[in-house]
Amino acid sequence: MRLPLFHRPEELNRILLLARELEASSTPISADAIQALARSNALHAERPSYRENIQVAVLFGLLTGGNSGYKITALGNAFIALNPDSHYELAPGQARFFVRKLHITGSI
């Protein structure tokens, strides 16, 4: 399986934290809403495609959903818990998660 482009892994934290905040209503959140909010609070001159990061989050089981909207999964919440300061950069435990998922288990 080929992963979609994943240029800025720190943006994964941004979309997961936003999805968790927006999910308080327990209604799935559209990709457009996640992207709009992520873009509005990004400080980078070059803004990545959040759709690609959403796809990666779904492939890794951190988000669930599709065209009808997305919800954060229990694994997504556990992934965020590995970043207790809620920084957008990947925390060491989050980086280890990707290494384990891709190289040790050999699956997504």
Image (cartoon, grey):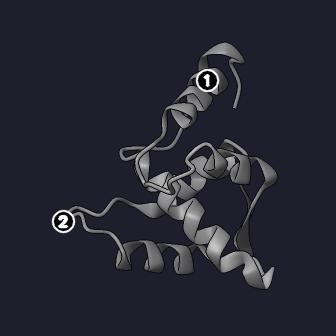
Q: Earlier in the sequence, mark 1 or mark 2?
A: 2
User: As drawn, is 5 to the left or to the right of 1?
Assistant: left
| Residue 42 lies in quadrant | bottom left
Q: Residue furthest front?
A: 85
Q: Which mark is residue 3?
A: none
Q: Badge 1 is on which residue? A: 102
Crowding at dot 2, Cα within 10 Å, few <14 / some 14-19 / many 20+, comes out as few
Q: Residue at x 58, y 30 (%)?
A: 98
Q: How many marks?
A: 2
Q: Could one spot residue 29 in this view of the protein?
A: no
Instruction: Give the image location of residue 64, x and y in percent.
Output: 75, 58
Q: In terms of secondary structure, where does tag 1 sit?
A: helix
Q: Residue at x 62, y 31 (%)?
A: 97
Seen from the viewer's position, the closer of residues 78 and 84 is 84
Figure quadrant of the C terminus: top right
What amino acid is labelled 1 in the image? Leu
Q: Badge 2 is on which residue? A: 45
Q: In terms of secondary structure, where does tag 2 sit?
A: loop
Q: Residue furthest left?
A: 45
User: As drawn, is 54 to the left or to the right of 87?
Assistant: right
Q: Residue at x 72, y 47 (%)?
A: 78
Instruction: Give the image location of residue 96, x and y in percent.
Output: 56, 26
What amino acid is labelled 2 in the image? Ala
Figure quadrant of the N terminus: top right
Seen from the viewer's position, the closer of residues 60 and 88 is 88
User: As drawn, is 4 to the left or to the right of 105?
Assistant: left
